[in-house]
Image: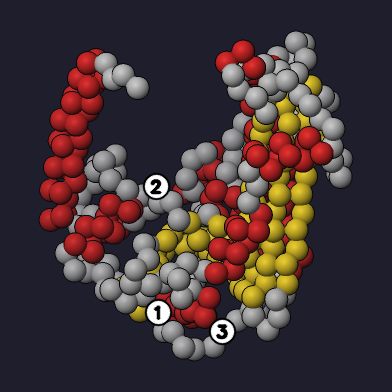
Amino acid sequence: MPVSSELVAGFVSLFKSLEKDLSVVEELMSLVKDVNVYLLKFGGRGVDVVASDSSRVVKKFRVAVVFAVQATGVKFGSKSVLVNDAVAGYSIASPASGFESIDDIVKRVAMFLSRELEVLMVEKLVNEGEVALFDGSVFTFLWYAKHPEIPETLAFSGRERPGTVRDIWRSTATVLSNVVEKTRAVFIAKTIRRSYYINKILQEQGVDKVVNDIILLDLLKKRGSLPREPHFIEPIYIENVKDLPRPLANLDEEDVRYIEKLLPITITYTTFSPRAPPYQVTVPGKLSAEELGEILSSLAPYTSSGYPDPLRVAHARCRLSWRELSLLLAKAGFVLPSGRELLGEFM
């Protein structure tokens, strides 16, 4: 594929800017405070662990938008259990409703349904004294954004059509509260973009625009302040709605009660193996370092690979690709034109 001189010049310019930003990050080393670190105590008492994950596919055709969501729940420990659930649907892309707006709504509906199914899978399997694992942060599951009405053209399989996306959000938050009342819910996020520790381990303010927690952890590691052994760092807490990450901090008044049941929230970063990267851990409730260490250490039998096996299995069992969905559509007799056949692209 030909590369234009304009594109080359653009990347040269970007690289110079990147070098400048990286130099700023390196200068932060002197500003970073040490943070208390706690080693995980492997070899202790294990617990039964429940985990869930989901996968979704949204496909836009010339005449309709089709979506599919598939979720899996697993239990590890004294006995092994696996459960599945799924929901599918479509919306006719009528001129009256506006095709692009329908496309956006269907994507949002599928995303919120994924979260709802995941918490429902855990609620179905978990008992008192067990640990419930979720893939992602608790803030991701509670993410609060625009909640449009769900158009009548959007049909669902196996369930009634919700009135708005907010109805699905409220259902997710309610079920999650039920899980938290029954057992300890632990959210493990692989992607770290937030800056919860900025004010805690930096000696100056005003640098949160150029660094996030993963960069701070990397600086601590380079300085030798973090051990190679499995560990977690001193937890911090979010205790009030106003301190939640946006847009959760700007909840509508009638929705605050759904979040308050889950506060305070404990935040830390943990490493389960010398070869594994750090993961963000968020847990509803205010846990001391000792309580948090007990919970994370109880996951030891399931983390030999550096990541909890129950989450890994749930992810593998729920994974859904467009190819698989297209085969399902073909088996069901659906042949929908994509509108891109002239470019040589077919289902």
Q: Is residue 176 left or right of residue 217?
A: right
User: Which residue is nearer to you in this view: 346 or 166?
Assistant: 346
Q: Kindly identify which numbered label has been placed on residue 142.
A: none
Q: Residue at x 73, y 20 (%)?
A: 337
Residue 170 spot, x, y in % from top left: 71, 46
Q: Residue at x 37, y 66 (%)?
A: 276
Residue denoted by label 3:
46
- State the colouring used for the structure image: secondary structure
- Sequence-earlier tag: 3 or 1: 1
Q: Is residue 158 left or right of residue 84?
A: right
Separation of residues labelled 3 and 2 (CA atoms): 31 Å
Residue denoted by label 1:
40
Residue denoted by label 2:
193
> Label 3 amino acid?
Gly
Dot 3 lies on which element?
loop
Q: Is residue 224 left or right of residue 128?
A: left
Above-or-below relation of 232 to 280 = below
Residue 233 in sight here: no
User: Which residue is nearer to you in this view: 23 or 326?
Assistant: 326
